[in-house]
Amino acid sequence: MTTRSPKTYRKKRDFRQTPEPKGGVKNAGGKKPIFVIQKHAARQLHYDFRLQVGRALKSWAVPKGPSLNPKDKRMAAEVEDHPLGYAEFEGVIPKGEYGAGTVMVWDTGSYRNVTKRDDKKIPITKALKRGHVAVLLDGKKIKGGYALSRIAKGKKPRWLLVKMKDEKADARRKPTKSETKSALTERTMKEIEKEEKK
Ligand code: MN
């Protein structure tokens, strides 16, 4: 069993306690692949960056969240694949459970894999394996190109998430600071907490 298998996701969670989805497939077939960035107020606030690959969401925990400034290198810790249904999860993971804290769908939309090598397109699965991925995001808050580059392999792979230089790059706009409402429900973290806490 690899650390990235769906079993890892299920093993870490007690589904009698957490409202997180057990699995479930959404957006299956035909449509463009989706991405989601979830704001997660766990012990340490971070943003979970997820890309749909087939029926799974490839996932990275990004402590500072995405930047629009191509000069910023944002640390991204690769975590276990999440089921596709997780892309619409917004709620409160109860105390004592894995990742306890409030989760918001901070941004979501579709993406396009634009990874190339020697001018040839590389499929996303291959790009992930090689440790270099370029994607064009079309979200509500975040748009344009981002590069993910693996800088450390092993049990806890580390990547860097960097804005590519394009017309969507903007060193002044700081969306993680100025845009704090859910892309799905327009709720704030506090509102989600109040409404979803059991
Ligand atoms: Mn998280």
Image (cartoon, helix red, strand yellow):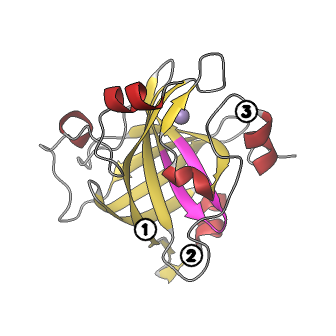
- Identify the secondary structure beneath mark 2: loop
Mark 2–mark 1 distance (CA, rounded to whole Å): 15 Å
- 28 on left or right of 113: right
Q: Residue furthest right?
A: 1
- Residue at left offset 46%, top offset 59%: 35
Q: Which mark is residue 13?
A: 3
The residue that mark 1 highlights is 111
Mark 3–mark 2 distance (CA, rounded to whole Å): 34 Å
Return the x and y of residue 31 as percentages of the image width and height: 51, 79
Q: Which mark is residue 143?
A: none
Three-letter amino acid code of the residue under disc 3: Arg
Q: Is residue 21 visible?
A: yes
Q: Quadrant of the C terminus?
A: top right
- Identify the secondary structure beneath mark 3: loop
Q: Which badge, 2 or 1, is on the more N-terminal residue?
A: 1
The residue that mark 2 highlights is 122
Q: Is residue 57 magenta?
A: yes
Question: Image quarter for residue 56?
Answer: bottom right
